Image (cartoon, helix red, strand yellow):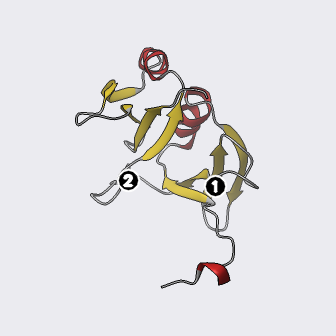
Amino acid sequence: MTDAANTPPFRMLHTMLRVFDLEKSLDFWVDKMGMKLLRRQDYPSGEFTLAFVGYGDETDSTVIELTHNWGQKEPYSIGSGYGHIAIGVPDIYGLCEKLGAAGVKIPRPPGPMKHGGSVIAFLEDPDGYKVELIERKAA
């Protein structure tokens, strides 16, 4: 068990997703989901590119690291352990209408949770990663 009084101030920095087509992923996360491309760097000796995207600067916000391995010949298998990334949005119905018109897959359209609670929807990015939208009205 950790002694909270003696623990340094931890902070979540980023979540990494391996992506098959970096340009399609950037189109989804930046152009469709409204994140900013914070930085992008190629690593020729390792044959990969890292692109960091987010709603705020890395100094005070958690971001997503998109990792593109240049030699990947097939899309990645997501596996059974991955769940989803959750994003709070003010108008889930309007956003899903706009995203659906732009070709984004929405396997679970917006609506109340089955057992009560929040209004949610699920999207898929170009690699099939699930993204949960949760409606959060402005205070």
Which quadrant of the structure image shows residue 26?
top right
Picture coordinates of residue 114 (x, y %)? 23, 33
Picture coordinates of residue 92 (x, y %)? 46, 23
Residue occupying the point 56% across, 55% down: 67
Nearest the camera: 120 or 30?
120
Q: Which residue is under mark 1?
A: 50
Q: Residue furthest left?
A: 115
Picture coordinates of residue 89 (x, y %)? 53, 30
Relative to residue 55, is residue 121 drawn left or right? left
- Amino acid of disc 2: Tyr
Q: Earlier in the sequence, mark 2 or mark 1?
A: 1
Q: CA distance from mark 2 to mark 1?
A: 16 Å
Name above or below for residue 104 compared with residue 54. above
Q: Residues within 10 Å of mark 2 (few under 14, many from 20)?
A: few
- Secondary structure under tag 1 reads strand
Residue occupying the point 73% across, 53% down: 60
Using the rendered image of the protein, determine whether residue 70 is visible from the camera's viewpoint: no
Circles 2 and 1 in contact, beta carbons < 8 Å: no
Residue occupying the point 54% across, 25% down: 90
Using the rendered image of the protein, determine whether residue 73 is visible from the camera's viewpoint: yes
Picture coordinates of residue 122 (x, y %)? 36, 34
Nearest the camera: 72 or 85?
85
Q: Which residue is under mark 2?
A: 76
Relative to residue 58, is residue 94 drawn left or right? left
Which quadrant of the structure image shows residue 48?
bottom right
Count of numbered labels shown in the rendering: 2
**Quadrant for the C terminus in the image:** top right
- Amino acid of disc 1: Leu
Residue occupying the point 56% across, 36% down: 29
Nearest the camera: 45 or 2?
2
- Secondary structure under tag 2 reads loop
